[in-house]
Image: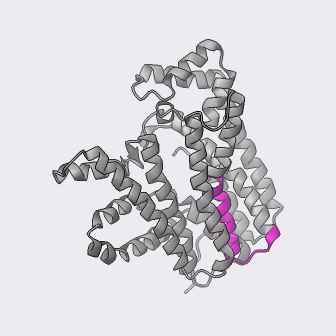
Amino acid sequence: MPRDYAPAAPLDDAFRAAVGESIDGFLEGQRERLAEIGSLPMLEVARSFTAGGKRLRPAFCYWANVAAAGHPTDATPLLALASSLDLLHVSALVHDDLIDAADTRRGLPAAHRQFEERHRAGAGRGAAGEFGVSSAILLGDLLLMWSIEMADGSGAPHLDRARPLLSATRTEVTAGQYLDVAAQFGMAGAGSIAEELAVANRVLEYKSARYSVRRPIQIGAALGNADDDVIAALGEFGSLVGRAFQLRDDVLGVFGDPAVTGKPWAGDLREGKRTVLALTALNAADPAQRAVLSTVLGSQDADDDLVAEAAAVIEDTGARADVEAMIDGGLSQALTLLEATSITDDGHTALRRLAELSVRRAA
């Protein structure tokens, strides 16, 4: 039977529950295989990380399909493919938390910390930290493989048309992650702060915007057999929204409330993330301000007072206001482009609302 969701509330409880059910059903289908191998703990930790989240990537994919082809008669295949994008996302998060040495994710211990605790509870041999890291690397790899398996087995229409976009998504997010790491270690060929900003903007596009919004939208449109012009226009819309989405994450990474974000306060500063926000502040700072911010960036042991001082530098240099202006400008451009794109009325409504939800948020 048809199962329509409300375009004015494209991320409502019903839609998020449907994505959760799709992922849960797929993961349950892996139980027998992992039990036979003796690797059920991987499934249990995977479940803990796939049970929540914003579900933005599946939503952008689903509603772009509606934008191209209208509501599907049977939403199950489309939901399965759209939901596979969240498995890819969680795969990236597991590895990202390892790279950042993060302790928490979505208010839960990070995957490597969960495996460490399992090691301690089971009185395992060797170092709990080494077991945690090794297990999380493998879990991230497994989630990537599962995202491919789930997409391939979805039965979504016009899947062959979407395959090149799915492949591009996986390559871009991984290569973009490497560029991000290279930038943090000064290995991206940038000498000045201005050059670092140029690299950070490439990271913004390839690590975040493409796999978060641009590619999910294009995949959904391709599954709806949209023409090339519509797919291209929706891709541009997706990049604008995706960049604003990540810039919002950067602001929340410094100024967000941990009780809402599920991440440590000002964690991006302590982790040394040289984001567009941080680099904009460094570029505008006077020597004294730059010294404060440089001292805190990458200092896990920085006390709260010093971190607060660094956050104040970001405010005082105007960097936060500049990034907020980038967010607002990107959203405005995206919505103008969307209005000019020939898609269904429900597609217009849903994608506009999703764009707003992506950037006007506290978590």
What's the residue at 66%, 79% (across, down)? 160
The span shown in magenta is: 208-229
Give residue 220's position: percent from left, percent from top: 66, 70
What's the residue at 78%, 64% (across, down)? 232
Q: Is residue 54 visible?
A: yes
Q: Is 147 on the left or on the right of 102, as rendered? A: right
On the image, which quarter does residue 287 sit in? Answer: top right
On the image, which quarter does residue 302 sit in? Answer: top left
What's the residue at 41%, 41% (across, down)? 102
In terms of secondary structure, what is the magenta stretch mainly? helix
Q: Is residue 9 visible?
A: no
What's the residue at 50%, 74% (across, down)? 150
Query: Measured along the vertical axis of the image, is residue 263 above or below residue 7?
Result: above
Give residue 290's position: percent from left, percent from top: 60, 18
Instruction: Indicate the quadrant containing the N terminus: top left, top right, bottom left or bottom right.
Output: bottom right
Give residue 45's position: percent from left, percent from top: 34, 59
Give residue 168's position: percent from left, percent from top: 65, 63
Nearest the viewer among 318 and 361 is 318
Q: Is residue 23 magenta?
A: no
On the image, which quarter does residue 212 sit in? Answer: bottom right
Q: Is 160 on the left or on the right of 343, as rendered? A: left
Nearest the viewer among 143 and 254 is 143
